[in-house]
C-alpha cells in the first residue's frame, strides 16, 4: 500500500489557517495519550476501553452527524482487535487536542471529509495494541507462547484454553503498553471492507440517542434570541416590558459577540421564551448593515466576471484562446444556499467559578474551546465540551468564529447566571441567521482547433471568499482563496492552454463552507461547459472526456464504471436522455450518470429524474454500506440545491424562513441511486462530500441532451424548469 499524500496540500494549510488566531494562543502537542481507565478496565490508549463485561468502547474524536463515522472508526478498532461486532459501542470524545487532534489539520475537529483517512492507521493501531495486551496476558496466565494464541470474534484461544476479553482485562491492564504492534494486511481484514450495521442505528431509531435538544439539567433556562433582520445591524434600543410580563420569562438581556448583536429572552421553557422574544420592541441601528439584495449582488458579479481576476492557474499561452479556430463562451450562476440541517442550531452552557461546561453537537472542538475561553477570560482547558450527536451540519457547525456557541456563552454571561442555559434557534432563525454557501458567477471560454479538440480554456470565478475574515485570512495566498477555485483550478482535463482566475468581492453577506465547498459550484460550471464544448464539436460527452482524461486514470475509472453500469450509448425510450459528470474532491473520485424524461408540452411540460448511476473511488471501502449511504445522501442534498435551493436577499435581509419557502427534495422526488465502488488498496479518503459536486452537472447535462438547451443557472425551478 502506497504512502498516503494529500493531493491538495494547500487544504492542509487552509485548515490550519482556519484557526490561526485562536491556535496562536494555545496549540498543544499532538500524539496519543492513555485513556483514563475505570476499575477493571483495559484502556491502553485514548481510543479504546475494554470492560469486564466484554464491552469494547471506541472513543470517537470525530462528531457523528449522520455521516457514519462512529461506525467507521469502530470498524477499524474492532477489526484489529478481532472483537465481535455485537460487543462494540462508541462514545464521543471530550475536547482535548493533545489526545484527539485531527491529524489532517493539527487540531480537534471534523471537516473536509478527513475523519476516516486521518484516523485509519491511528484507530487500527489502537485496536491492535489492545489485542496485543490481551494476548500477552493470556500467554502469561496459560503458559502458552503468544504466537500460538489466536483471537476470534471476542474470544482469545490458545492450546486448550480460551477466554473472553472481560476475563483478561484485569491482567492485561497491569502490563506495559507496547510501543509498536503489527497491523493486519488487507487480506486478513474481517470487518474492514464488509457491510456492517451502524452502531448508532438502534438508539436513533428508538429515540434514545442524545442530541442537544434532549439535554435537561436542574434549574435550566431556555434562551431564544431576537437577531437583527439585516446583516451587520446592531441593537439601538429595546423595550422589554411586554416580554417580561409573560409568565415563565425570567430575564431579558442584550449581548454582543464578534459577529452579531441581539437580545435574548430567558425563560423556564421554550414557548415562554419564544413568546417573550416575539413581544420585544427593538429598534435596530442599520448604519453599518448590508443594504444590497441578491439581485444587485449578482449584477455586480456579472460585471466583474466580464473582466480579469487574479490568476489561480496559468498553463501554456493565454493568447491561444484568441487564435483558436472556434471559440465558445458561457456564464454559469449559483445562488446563496443555506445549510438547512435537520437539527437547527442549539447549545447548552453552564458557567461556574473559573469554568464553563458546554453540551453540543460539537464539530470544531479546538476552535470553539479557544473562542469561548477568550470571551470568558479563561484558559482553554477550563472550557469543557461534551460532544453529542448532531442532526446534520454540512459545514455550518464548523465556524471559525464559533458563532452560535459563543452566542450561547455570551447570553449566559450577560445574564450573570450560574444556572444552565439552553439556547435554541428556531427553524426561521436557522434559515436567516447567516453563514451561507456563497453566490458565484462563472465566466468560461473555450477554444477549439479545426478538429473540434479543446486547445484553450479560460475560467473566471467570481464570488465571496469564505476565508476572508480575521480568523482565516492568513490562508489566502496572493489573493487566491483556494476553496473558491478548487475543482476549477484543479481541472483534470488535458488542455494545453488553461487559465483560471478569481475575483473575490465583499458584499458583506456572511458566508461559510457548505458541503463539498468550492468543488460543488466549480464542477457544475466546468462539467456543464464541457458538454457544451462536446456538443459544438459534435463529440459524445463520454468520448471527449476519455480523451481529455488521459493523465487522470482515477477520474477515468469512475467515469467508465458509471457509464458502463448506466448503459451509456444504449438506446433509450423516446423522451429520455442521459447526462454524465465526474469530479474529484477531498481526494476521492465520483462520477454520476443521470437519466431524465420529459412529459407534456409548453407550460405543462415536466421533467422527471428516472435514475442515478454512481461510481466512487475513495480508497479502501471501510464500510461499503456507509459509502453507498453517503453517496445517496450527497445526491439528495445536491439535487435539492440544483432543483430548488436558493437564499434570496432584499436590502440586506433574507426572505426565506422555513421549508415552505426554502424547499428541499422530498422522498417522493428522490430517484433510485445505484452506487458502485471501485476496489482499491489506497488508504481511505473522503466520502461525506465528494458525491455532491458531479450531481448537478450530470442532471443539467441530461437536460441539455434532451432539450438542446444548456442549463446555466441554478436552481432550475427558479428558471422555469419544473420536475415532477
Image: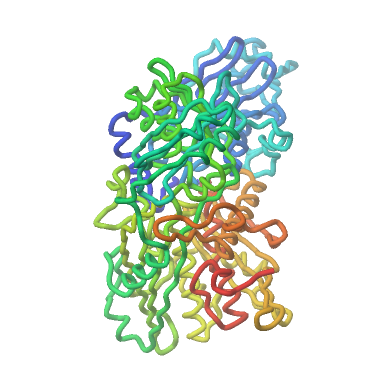
User: Residue 640 or 99: which is nearer the viewer?
Assistant: 640
- Marks counted in the figure total 0
x, y (%) of residue 700? 56, 72
- In terms of depth relative to the viewer, which is nearer, 29 or 716? 716
Residue 603 visible in the current orientation? yes
Specify the quadrant of the image occupied by residue 166. top right
Rendering colour mode: rainbow
Describe residue 406's horizontal placement relative to residue 182 as left or right: left
Q: Residue drawn 68% across and 13% down?
A: 167
Q: Nearer the viewer, residue 308 or 523?
A: 308
Front-most of 4 and 329? 329
Residue pictured at 56% horizontal, 64% vertical? 642
Residue 471 appears at what percent x and percent y? 31, 42
Q: Quadrant of the C terminus?
A: bottom right
Identified at 58% across, 14% down, the residue is 172
The answer to whether residue 510 is above or below residue 121 is below
As drawn, 603 above or below 404: below
Residue 93 seen anywhere in this rendered image of the structure: no
At which x and y percent is residue 13? 33, 46
Amino acid at each position: 500500500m502506497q504512502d498516503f499524500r494529500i493531493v491538495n496540500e494547500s487544504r492542509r494549510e487552509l485548515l490550519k489557517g482556519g484557526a490561526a488566531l485562536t491556535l496562536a494562543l494555545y496549540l498543544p502537542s499532538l500524539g496519543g495519550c492513555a485513556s483514563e481507565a475505570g476499575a477493571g478496565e483495559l484502556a491502553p490508549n485514548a481510543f479504546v476501553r475494554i470492560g469486564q463485561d466484554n464491552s469494547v468502547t471506541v472513543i470517537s474524536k470525530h462528531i457523528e452527524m449522520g455521516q457514519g463515522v462512529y461506525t467507521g472508526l469502530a470498524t477499524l478498532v474492532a477489526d484489529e482487535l478481532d472483537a465481535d461486532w455485537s460487543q462494540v459501542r462508541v462514545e464521543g470524545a471530550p475536547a482535548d487536542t493533545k489526545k484527539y487532534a485531527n491529524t489532517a489539520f493539527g487540531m480537534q475537529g471534523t471537516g473536509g471529509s478527513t475523519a476516516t483517512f486521518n484516523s485509519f492507521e491511528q484507530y487500527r493501531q489502537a485496536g491492535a495494541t489492545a489485542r496485543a495486551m490481551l494476548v500477552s496476558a493470556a500467554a502469561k496466565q496459560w503458559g502458552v507462547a503468544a504466537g500460538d494464541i489466536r483471537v476470534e470474534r471476542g474470544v482469545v484461544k490458545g492450546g486448550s484454553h480460551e477466554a473472553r476479553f472481560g476475563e483478561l482485562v484485569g491482567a492485561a491492564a497491569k502490563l506495559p503498553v507496547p510501543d509498536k504492534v503489527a497491523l493486519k494486511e488487507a487480506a486478513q481484514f474481517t470487518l474492514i471492507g464488509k457491510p456492517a450495521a451502524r452502531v448508532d442505528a438502534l438508539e436513533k431509531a428508538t429515540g434514545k440517542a442524545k442530541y442537544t435538544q434532549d439535554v435537561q439539567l436542574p434549574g435550566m433556562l431556555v434562551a431564544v434570541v431576537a437577531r437583527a433582520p439585516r446583516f451587520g445591524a446592531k441593537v439601538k434600543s429595546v423595550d422589554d416590558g411586554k416580554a417580561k410580563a409573560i409568565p415563565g420569562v425570567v430575564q431579558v438581556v442584550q449581548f454582543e459577540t464578534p459577529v452579531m448583536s441581539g437580545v435574548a429572552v430567558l425563560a423556564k421553557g421554550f414557548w415562554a421564551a419564544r413568546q417573550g422574544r416575539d413581544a420585544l420592541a427593538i429598534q435596530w441601528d442599520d448604519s453599518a448593515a448590508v443594504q444590497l439584495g441578491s439581485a444587485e449582488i449578482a449584477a455586480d458579479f456579472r460585471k466583474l466576471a466580464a473582466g480579469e481576476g487574479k490568476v489561480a492557474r496559468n498553463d501554456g499561452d493565454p493568447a491561444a484562446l484568441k487564435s483558436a479556430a472556434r471559440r465558445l463562451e458561457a456564464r454559469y450562476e449559483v445562488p446563496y444556499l443555506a445549510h438547512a440541517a435537520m437539527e437547527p442550531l442549539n447549545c447548552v452552557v453552564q458557567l461556574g467559578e473559573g469554568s464553563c461546561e458546554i453540551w453540543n453537537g460539537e464539530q470544531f472542538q479546538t476552535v470553539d474551546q479557544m473562542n469561548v475561553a477568550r470571551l470568558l477570560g479563561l484558559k482553554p482547558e477550563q472550557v469543557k465540551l461534551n460532544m453529542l450527536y448532531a442532526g446534520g451540519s454540512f459545514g455550518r457547525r464548523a465556524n471559525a468564529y464559533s458563532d452560535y456557541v459563543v452566542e450561547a456563552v455570551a447570553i449566559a454571561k450577560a445574564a450573570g447566571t450560574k444556572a444552565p442555559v439552553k439556547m435554541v434557534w428556531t427553524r426561521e432563525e436557522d434559515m436567516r441567521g447567516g453563514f451561507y454557501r456563497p453566490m458565484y458567477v462563472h465566466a468560461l471560454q473555450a477554444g477549439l482547433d479545426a478538429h473540434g479538440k479543446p486547445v484553450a480554456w479560460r475560467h473566471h470565478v467570481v464570488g465571496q471568499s469564505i476565508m476572508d475574515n480575521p480568523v482565516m485570512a492568513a490562508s489566502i495566498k496572493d489573493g487566491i482563496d483556494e476553496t473558491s477555485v478548487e475543482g476549477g483550478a484543479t481541472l483534470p482535463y488535458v488542455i494545453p492552454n488553461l487559465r483560471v482566475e478569481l475575483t473575490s468581492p465583499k458584499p458583506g453577506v456572511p458566508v461559510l463552507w457548505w458541503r463539498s465547498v468550492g468543488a460543488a459550484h466549480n464542477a457544475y460550471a466546468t462539467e456543464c461547459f464541457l458538454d457544451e464544448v462536446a456538443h459544438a464539436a459534435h463529440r459524445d460527452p463520454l468520448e471527449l472526456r476519455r480523451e481529455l482524461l488521459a493523465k487522470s486514470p482515477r477520474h477515468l475509472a469512475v467515469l467508465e464504471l458509471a457509464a458502463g453500469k448506466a448503459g451509456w450509448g444504449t438506446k433509450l425510450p423516446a423522451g429520455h436522455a442521459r447526462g454524465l459528470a465526474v469530479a474529484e474532491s477531498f481526494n476521492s473520485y465520483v462520477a454520476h450518470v443521470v437519466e431524465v424524461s420529459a412529459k407534456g408540452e409548453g407550460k405543462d411540460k415536466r421533467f422527471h429524474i428516472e435514475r442515478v448511476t454512481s461510481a466512487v473511488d475513495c480508497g479502501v471501502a471501510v464500510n461499503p454500506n456507509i459509502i453507498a449511504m453517503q453517496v445517496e445522501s450527497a445526491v439528495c442534498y445536491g439535487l435539492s440545491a440544483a432543483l430548488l435551493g436558493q437564499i434570496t436577499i432584499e436590502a440586506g435581509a433574507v426572505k426565506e424562513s422555513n421549508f415552505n419557502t426554502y424547499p428541499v427534495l422530498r422522498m417522493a422526488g428522490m430517484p433510485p441511486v445505484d452506487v458502485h465502488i471501485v476496489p482499491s488498496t489506497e488508504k481511505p479518503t473522503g466520502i461525506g462530500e465528494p458525491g455532491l459536486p458531479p450531481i448537478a452537472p450530470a442532471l443539467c447535462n441530461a437536460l441539455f441532451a434532451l432539450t438542446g438547451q444548456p442549463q446555466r443557472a441554478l436552481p432550475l425551478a427558479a428558471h422555469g424548469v419544473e420536475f415532477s
